[in-house]
Image (tube, grey):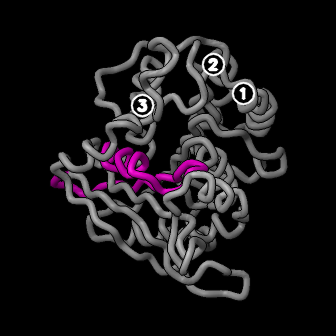
Amino acid sequence: MRVPGGSRLQAMKPRLLLCNCLALCWAVPLLLGGPAAAQTVAIPADAESALDALNSSPRHGEWIDIGEGRSGANRWGDTIRSWIVYPERATRAPVVVVIHEIFGLTDWIRAVADQFAAEGFIAIAPDLLSGHGADGGGTPANRQEAVALVRSLRVEDTTRRLSAVARYGISLPASNGRFGGVGFCWGGSTSFNFAANEENLDAAVVYYGSSPSRTMLGRVEAPVLGLYGGDDARVNATIPDAMREMRRLGKFYEPHQFDGAGHGFLRQQSARDGANLSAAKAAWAKTVEFFRQHLEK
């Protein structure tokens, strides 16, 4: 039995043995190589067309409130407002927790969750500002207010909330009991941190987010896929140390940099003379393949 946020109740998963070997063999060449040819996989809508994509989606999506329990350290309230989308499939599906950017939970993140559902995953996008906005609300409409609030969040609080969302997801009758996390920008860093703090996580994807400290990397058990714009030095400067440390520890970390693409390339697909769109197509195909490999068991 696997309980996110709790103790591991089973032996170490066999996937880690494979991941350890692959990490040693693949990390360096993948970091230095250019983008591979993208598979034919539909990518999420960009920020400008996200709402239209949501309005035209045939999949079932709804707002839910997920209880996380109240404690003395919990200053946000005991529910997490979340957007969940279900895939159209006959078998039980894995869960993907979609972690928003520094802008909070936006239509674009909800559209990304919808595209994960299109690929066969139960996708849940929590508003990690739930209870933290005005009058106990969540992400504010004003972007700069959202940014300021997200910057105030503590890692331990965010981890507890993400674990609660994962527990909810894998408890659903339609779930196969496995879950991964993916995040973008601030959410990318948070996804990597979540991999260090949630021992039951099955896979993590980091989109253009900075890497954790060496101490935290030592706690990572799940395989990690990293996807970065080539022209994003602020974030990319943290990759080599993480790669060396994960390799030293025998852990799986597969970073890819996409030439010419900037920060936030999946959201801003029309920017940078086609480089962002090319990166978005290649990165999304790798994301879907990675989650299918580690979550469809």
Type of amino acid at the residue the image marks with label 3: Trp
Q: Which residue is mark 3?
A: 284
Viewer-proximal residue among 265 and 85: 265
Q: Which residue is mark 1?
A: 236
Q: Nearer the viewer, mark 2 or mark 3?
A: 2
Identify the mark nearer the N-term, 2 or 1: 2
Type of amino acid at the residue the image marks with label 2: Gly
Residue at 54% over, 56% down: 142
Q: Where does the image place residue 22, in percent across and percent down from the top left?
A: 60, 29
Q: Which residue is mark 2?
A: 230
Q: Where does the image place residue 40, in percent across and percent down from the top left?
A: 29, 22
Marks 1 and 3 close (CB-CB < 8 Å) = no
Marks 2 and 1 close (CB-CB < 8 Å) = yes
Q: Is residue 117 left or right of residue 191?
A: left
In the rendered view, tell whether residue 207 sits above or below residue 137.
above
Alpha carbon separation for disc pair 1 and 3: 19 Å
SS at mark 2 in the image: loop
